[in-house]
Amino acid sequence: MGNVIAKPARKIEVSFYLSWVNIWPSMPDSNPDEDTTNLTVPEQAEVFLRESSSPLPSYSLLRRVASSFRRSLTNGQIPLGGVDAPSCSETNLASGDYNPNSDCTCNGLYPVPHDAGIDSIMEQANCTAIHNTHQALQTVLKRKSEWNTTSLFSPRNLIEAVTELLLANADVRDPPTTCQGPAEVTNLHKIRAPDRRPSPQNDTVDVIHRQLYPAAEDVKFCTDAKYYFVLGAIHSDPAHDGLIRAIADAGNDILIADYCEVADAATLKLLQQSGAAAVAFPKLCVLLGIFSEWSFENMMASVLHFRVLGYYRDHARSRLPSGVYGSRMTSLTAHRYVDLGIFFAVASTSVWTKEQVNEAEFTLLNIVCTFINDMVDLRSDTARKQRENIVLRGVRGDLCEYLDQMMFECIETATLAVQTNPTCAYVLMAFCNWAVMSSHHKVYEISTQVSEVGKQDECLSRSRDHQRAYWGLLEVLAPYGTLGKEGPRVGQTRAELDFRYGVCRSSSTLHAAWLADITRSLLEPRTLRRIVDVVHFEWTGCEGEVEYCP
């Protein structure tokens, strides 16, 4: 079990945080040579504390704090997770200018030469996205004093993640066999899946969803990740809602990395600016001792690593083979350790539990969340030739046996995570909540719109082991409660879940029970098999715009 964070969080109202976000983009860019009177860093913290505690905070004083903070950052007086202040926009996570878009017309590097490495990829690939990724990697590695390299996110983690991503299309394997025979007699080369757009039939109408789950940006993909996962890891409470909103928004660059291709200029600017404001807000809370320095430094290292990966795009996708097959995969967490971005949920949960997690615990969380994420997205990623998917790249041998093992390990690892400590338990349950409730995962569709195909008695008989593992999961989830028949289920539409979850969020007891119930539903072996088992269950719904990003 990780260490305990000693100091509790001070009450931070949402309205106070939103005032800060509103002020930030109205500030002019700081000129270090401009001679103006600014608050010193200790004075900024003092005024910030006083105004956050006031029943009627002064907007003008808060504006002065924001202006002074930006100037202090420009003058190299405020580090963001490291010993030294950021010296370039790549490491300045409050710069508000991250945009990994690249104007590249190449068709990618495929096939990838045998025994290729990053250096050889750089020599052979005439790809702007690959070169931008490599350049960002080198920039960050050269500035190790500007981020906490001894946090959960080390230089080794970043190098491994970049290498894994750039070489994902190497070592392509032959299609797997199944209980139905060799690949050529199956439909594994043409897996179907729904697109990732919100569904008019199954999702809450946009204007209502925005009122249930308000966010600065009008992008459901982003709102889903924040409310169902980062904010969803902890119940809503006026005492901490402002800080938790800041934690969620401080990860905006993660969402930009995933969403930038389809974001219009205004939305991109809003994500950039509100994200920059959100980075500054918890930094001031750290200076005051009302937010954990451990959490902040790991948040900054996490998003810094993710920004590097965010430059990469696989421009060879259109030339890749279709269907289910394995390729280079060195470990479950080689790039998902960074790419899932789950530390922000750890940080928000820690505000409530007052716990830290160590590297072993964080790795365990990454493993189980990788299982869940990549099994839920297996059909979609296969159909779209998205080779980042670990479960897809890890395919070897008989597919029936392989998927069976993946499902078993997922349930067992989830049980271990819940057993570890409350922080790990809440993060895992919140991840399940996001997997089910977010529009782009389409769990409702892929779990209810499938039909059985092929012979399966022998394969499905192995589910007895899954059931035994599941009983263990039910046992460790029991202390978190249940809503009984009123609990959330995978078979309910996201619109139905939205309204009921909105009620449960404001109660710590109801919220914990909701998260436990949705975890029970998603990881129930028969439900999980319908989602994951592309051999025995064929999805039969309407595809829509499959190439839609995200």
Image: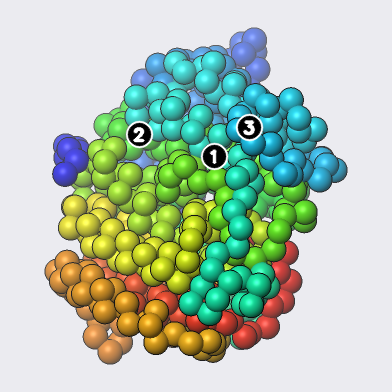
| Residue 450: mark in rendering | none
Please state which of the two labelled residues, at mark 3 or mark 1, is closer to the viewer.
3
Spatial CA span between label 1 and label 2:
18 Å
What is the secondary structure assignment of the residue under circle 2? loop
In this rendering, position of residue 176 left or right of residue 83: right
The colouring scheme, among rainbow, by chain, secondary structure or one colour, is: rainbow
Q: Where in the figure is residue 447, as x and y percent of width and height?
A: 49, 81
The answer to whether the residue labelled 3 contacts the one labelled 1, judged by CB atoms less than 8 Å apart, is no
Residue corresponding to mark 3: 116
What quarter of the picture does the C terminus occupy? bottom right
Spatial CA span between label 3 and label 1:
11 Å
Instruction: Mark 1: give few (<14), some (14-19) or many (20+) Cα within 10 Å.
Output: many
Dot 1 or dot 2, earlier in sequence: 2
Please state which of the two labelled residues, at mark 2 or mark 3, is closer to the viewer.
3
In this rendering, position of residue 445 left or right of residue 239: right
Q: Amino acid at mark 3?
A: Ala
Q: Amino acid at mark 2?
A: Leu
Q: Where in the figure is residue 408, as x and y percent of width and height?
A: 32, 67
Q: Is residue 517 visible?
A: no
Q: Where in the figure is residue 301, as x and y percent of width and height?
A: 44, 32
| Residue 152: mark in rendering | 2
Dot 3 or dot 1, earlier in sequence: 3
Spatial CA span between label 2 and label 3:
28 Å
Q: Where in the figure is residue 298, as x and y percent of width and height?
A: 38, 35
